[in-house]
Image (cartoon, rainbow, N blue to C red):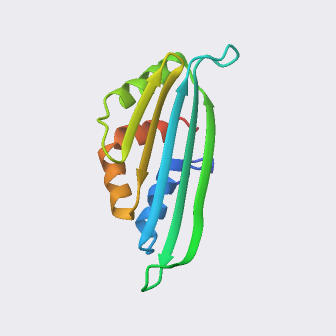
Amino acid sequence: MNAFNNNGNIKQFKLTRLINENCADEHVVTKMSIVLRRDKIEAPYYMVTKIKVSSCIDNADGGLIHAMDLASLNRMHNLTEKAYNEIESLIDDISESDEVKVTSDEKGIKMTIMSRSNADTINLFEKHQELFERLDGLIC
């Protein structure tokens, strides 16, 4: 899997999946948020994506030995109306679960994904593949 496009720009969701697929730590927490906004005059169709991957290694007694941020990615997008509507539709089609929460108001929509293991994160990537590919596809 290549986490970069032809111009060398990072495909943030592919990079996150690559980290989860290749990390052997027991406790890996992955938190992703996607925020679509329509309330700015200078950027009427706006999106912010934030991803954080952290790892914790416990000792036999359950005490924390080591905690580390593996990745922290943040990207801001000015979208076309068409791209905004496509992404909004993909998010609207997602069912909420313990790991996935979607909230909306008159200003926009927010999707938060949080998993506590590599396997759970990989399953979420497979389940919502169309959304993540669309978001990574925004980067030329």
Horizontal side of residue 2 vs 98, given as left or right: right
Mark yes or no: residue 137 visible.
Answer: no
Q: Say if 47 sits above or below 51 in the image.
A: above
In this orientation, does residue 133 appear? yes
- Please report the residue visible at 32 percent of the width from the left and 34 percent of the height from the top: 94
Total marks shown come to 0
Residue at x 61%, y 54% (from the top left corner) = 72
Quadrant assignment for the C terminus: top right
Q: Residue 82, how many percent across, how many down? A: 48, 18
Q: Say which residue appears at 37% left-offset and 50% top-offset.
A: 125
Q: How far across and down, in percent of the image, does residue 8 sit?
A: 62, 51
Q: Is 41 rendered above or below residue 100?
A: above
Q: Nearer the viewer, residue 58 or 46?
A: 58
- Residue visible at 31% across and 50% down? 126
Point out the image quarter for the N terminus.
bottom left
- Specify whether 36 is left or right of 61: right
The image shows residue 42 at horizontal and vertical percentages of 70, 16
